[in-house]
Image (cartoon, rainbow, N blue to C red):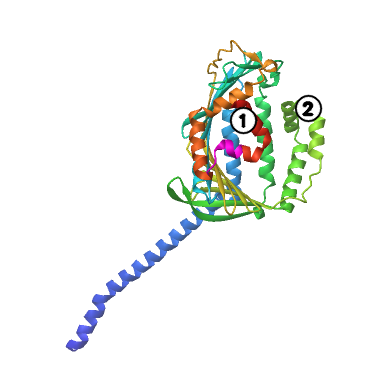
Amino acid sequence: MNNQEELVIKEEHNSSPNKKSKKKLIIGLVITIFVLLVVVGIALAVILPKYSPKNVFKTTINEAYKTSSKELKNDFDTMYFTFSLTPEVKGSGSALLEDMISNFSIKLQGGIDYKNKTFSYNLVTNYKDKEFINADFQYDKEFYLILDKLYNNPIMAEESDFTDAFTKADVESLKTVIEEYSKAFDESLKDEYFESDKQTITVGDKKVKSRVSILNLNKENTKEIDKYMQKKLLKNDEFLNAYAKLTSVSKEEVIKSLEEESDYEDFTDTKIKLYTGMWNKDLIKIQFVYDDMAVELEKNDENNNAWKISFKNDEITMVFNLEYTYEYNKKIDLKDVSGAVNSKELPADALTQILTNIKSQDGYKLLDEDVKDATTMSIDQLLSLFLGSSYNNYNNTVY
């Protein structure tokens, strides 16, 4: 064997382990990729059905029922709550008008005492954080209206009957009705009613990627859903008895009501959209779309105590920012109503006094200035223009 042949043999001998190791590496990579694909495939097969639009709807309905069931109580003597609202308008074409509307705010707070059969609520409207109207509505054997700064005496309405206000709802019956109705609706849903989408939406100041689960309702499938639920609930004695007890009617009347045929001819195609996280079912907002109108409900906090409700068409968006709290068994304080005047015995100029005093409120004055800036006319002049002689006659009695 010559030197050249010996060199070739040595090279082949030395290169064979490298080739084998490369083959092993390639085979290992192929197996690893295959295993990963199988694992991912299994994971998607398990996970994706859970995020199907129908299942997202079912989960949302079930979570809503669980939350409401926890909050529904019957073992309390009083219930106190606060509620605030601020409006917004966008797309009107008038920045001044939009600014004026956004400067209004309404706050209602108070509560009801079921044990002592009394209630007391305070309503305040502000403009630019200055008081516009402050009124108290109170019941203690008689109904009273107390107009802080607007009229000197409480106004009493005799023979006001608020008996029904102090009757608590049958909580167990209400829970049963909600649960059975939700179940029937869940079962009525078919995959073919749904579609899904992905969108990036604005939540507060952030852009958020969301999964959109869409229920498409039309005349045909709405009829199918109604018929299924009707059939299901008519066979459900637990639902029928609970509904009858809750509404104080007979079981036969509930059955008769359920058996009534609905008219679907004027039904407008509607889309119900649930916006959730990409990899969870946490609800971000709900949207109802019909004709050229969209109504949205969006959470403003994690505790479900603040919501933004929007009404949108192609041009204008009207927004209401709502916030509320409630508390059980908090003492409900009543205001002093000594010197109350019977509403039937109010002096002839009582309304004139009230309206005149409204004009002296800081909130009214600020609004009047802004109205003048926007229209070159005062509120009085605008009311006179639109209401004519009836408002002019009132003005003459004031001045």
On the image, which quarter does residue 381 sit in? top right
Say above or below: 87 vs 126: below
Observer-nearest of 66 and 28: 66
Can the viewer see residue 40 in this picture?
yes
Q: Is residue 46 left or right of residue 194?
A: left
Task: Give the labeled residue for mark 2.
Answer: 249
Observer-nearest of 307 and 61: 307
Q: CA distance from mark 2 to mark 1?
A: 51 Å
Task: Give the labeled residue for mark 1.
Answer: 395
* Image quarter in which the N terminus is found: bottom left
Q: Tags 2 and 1 in contact by the CB under 8 Å rule?
A: no
Instruction: Choose mark 2 or mark 1, whichever is in front.
Output: 1
| Residue 316 at x, y percent in the picture | 57, 50
Say above or below: 397 vs 288: above
The tally of labels here is 2
Characterize the magenta stretch by its predominant secondary structure.
Answer: helix
Q: Residue furthest bottom?
A: 2
Q: Secondary structure at mark 2?
A: loop
| Residue 77 at x, y percent in the picture | 59, 17
* Image quarter in which the C terminus is found: top right
**What range of the chain is rendered magenta?**
376-383
Q: Residues within 10 Å of mark 2 (few under 14, many from 20)?
A: few
Q: Residue furthest left?
A: 3
Q: Secondary structure at mark 1?
A: helix
Answer whether residue 332 is magenta in the image: no
Answer whether residue 382 is magenta in the image: yes
